[in-house]
Image (cartoon, helix red, strand yellow):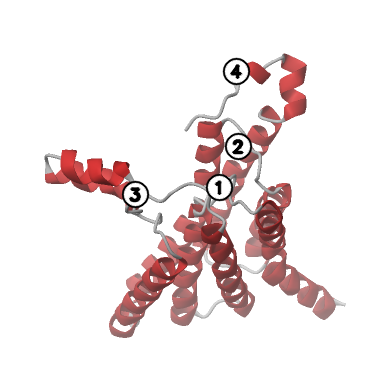
Amino acid sequence: MTDIFSIVLSFSMVFGPIVGYIDQYRIIKQRHSSEGFNSKACAILLFANILRVFFWLGKRFDTTLLLQSIVMIVTQLVLLEAVVYFRTTPTLLDDSSSETLSIVSEAGHPWTLAWQRRQLFWNWPTYLDYFNFLLAFTTAVGLLYVFLHQWAPFVEIIGFLSLSIESTLPIPQCIYHSRHRSTEGFSRLVLATWFLGDSFKVFYYAFTHAPIQFVGCGIFQLLVDFCLVFQCIWYSSTFRKWFHRGADYEIIE
């Protein structure tokens, strides 16, 4: 019975987190638009899980968490392709973008230019640009791992970075909702997956005695999930009607 429970638990950990993203993919395909979903969520999960693979290579904790990372990487690559293909707003790197020209021409101080150009990151025109960057990132981390994997603090730092990045997952979506004052286009199944999944992950990490990085970051992520739940209630059409707030909620560009 214990073995069956462990198998079910492991299966849930590997495939449970991707259910919401499958639904988000369906919504994007159905609406022919990725508006409402922040592509930085894909970035966070890709960076975090790539780092976690190297963390596992250096520390060899539960294999289930390695499989979870591999499945999530594949899922996010597929979802990212749909997000980029059905993107409705022009990128800052588009030749026709006047905003890009103003960033380059009006920035006087190098630090000002660097700060303004932060907007260009993860806002590239083609899927291949994203894929090439991820390939370069993985190669760079891989080279560092080859030379430093025997140094224990390096492995711990990778683990800390991986879980710290993952714990920020709901934050870009929260910011997106606040700016647009709407949660339209965002899959409620993704929200349910985040909230229930993070609750389950904290339990699983404690149950399997996972490294402390997993537990701490899981708790932080769960707290941010509460903010997302609040936003989905606050910006819902039903809640607006109750408080007659519909006129106050125009989309902020």
Tell me which numbered mark, 1 or 2, is placed earlier along the sequence.
Answer: 1
Residue type at tag 1: Pro
Tell me which numbered mark, 1 or 4, is placed earlier along the sequence.
Answer: 1
Identify residue for label 1: 170
Residue 100 relative to residue 76: left or right? left
Tell me which numbered mark, 1 or 3, is placed earlier along the sequence.
Answer: 3
- Considering the numbered disc 1 on the image, is that residue within a helix, a strand or a loop? helix
Label count reads 4
* Contact, mark 1 vs mark 2 (Cβ under 8 Å): yes
Nearer to us in this view, 195 or 7: 195
Residue 237 versus residue 193 in the image, above or below: above
Residue 227: image tag: 2
Report x, y in % for residue 238: 77, 26
User: Which image quadrant for residue 32?
Assistant: bottom right
Tell me which numbered mark, 2 or 4, is placed earlier along the sequence.
Answer: 2
Report x, y in % for residue 6: 77, 75
The residue lying at 67 percent from left, 58 percent from top is 29
Identify residue for label 3: 96
User: Which image quadrant for residue 124?
Assistant: bottom left
Mark 4 and mark 3: Cα distance apart in space:
32 Å
Nearer to us in this view, 219 or 76: 76
Residue type at tag 2: Cys
Mark 1 and mark 4: Cα distance apart in space:
25 Å
Answer few, some or many: residues within 10 Å of disc 4's Cα (few below 14, many 20 plus, some between 14 and 19): few
Mark 1 and mark 2: Cα distance apart in space:
9 Å
